[in-house]
Image (cartoon, rainbow, N blue to C red):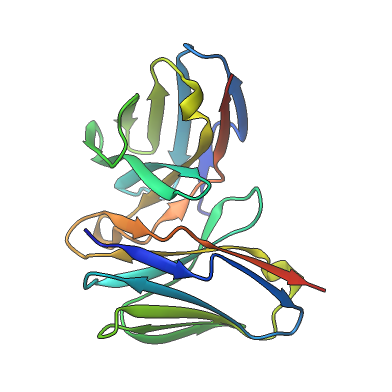
Amino acid sequence: DVKVTQSSRYLVKRTGEKVFLECVQDMDHENMFWYRQDPGLGLRLIYFSYDVKMKEKGDIPEGYSVSREKKERFSLILESASTNQTSMYLCASSRRDRAPDLLFGPGTRLTVT
Amino acid sequence: KNEVEQSPQNLTAQEGEFITINCSYSVGISALHWLQQHPGGGIVSLFMLSSGKKKHGRLIATINIQEKHSSLHITASHPRDSAVYICAAWGGSNYKLTFGKGTLLTVNP
């Protein structure tokens, strides 16, 4: 069964901590995405990667960075977590030739206190 | 920039009712995606369509490209259909999807 997995379903961190969210897909997809989802705002794109070591900023990249050293793994990094980064984080992947046909992971609910 | 509007924001129905959720977008698109998210759960793709109609079980999605409008219908609704339904528009030129804010559907037994 093909899937996208995320390292944690729930995470609680303190303000100022460095936070790593990991995402792994087993479908050999070229594209990988990180979104955050907030009530009333919907899904917003943080970063996108279309190949190993390649990345592009999405709509809200401030306060985040990403790493893609292997094709199957895409990491989201919060360099210094802040309370306004409390949110649901969703990873997704897709084939290069079917960019909008996303497969989502289960999500990580991050709380920064 | 494409704006995607969904209506209604919230919808409560009785089991067995016919449900319609609407999605309108402001700029021409190549495809529209309907997604489902159960409470506390991940997001699942229901349909991706660029014209006409698609059907899967009790779910039907239609799109009218000229009117920039899509609808998701659920026939004989069931409490397990309770979820947030999200539409997302794809312009065709890059990877970016523009998401609606979602419709929360609650189906009571």
Q: Nearer the viewer, residue A96 or B49?
A: B49
The residue most toward the top is A16
Pinpoint residue B94: horizontal percent, then vertical percent. 20, 56
Q: A28 above or below A62?
A: below
Badge count: 0
Pinpoint residue A111: horizontal percent, then vertical percent. 58, 27
Pinpoint residue B95: horizontal percent, then vertical percent. 25, 54
Q: B77 above or below A111?
A: below
Q: Write down the quadrant of residue B30 in the picture.
A: bottom left
Q: Residue at x 42, y 73 (%)?
A: B23
Q: Write down the quadrant of residue A47 in the picture.
A: top left
Q: Residue at x 62, y 50 (%)?
A: B41
Quadrant where the N terminus of chain A sits is bottom right
Left or right, B101 with reference to B73: left
Q: B17 above or below A24?
A: below
Quadrant where the C terminus of chain A sits is top right
Q: Residue at x 46, y 76 (%)?
A: B22
The residue most toward the left is B93
The residue most toward the right is B109
Q: A55 above or below B69?
A: above
Pinpoint residue A85: horizontal percent, then vertical percent. 47, 28
Left or right, B85 with reference to B78: left
Left or right, A31 with reference to B48: left
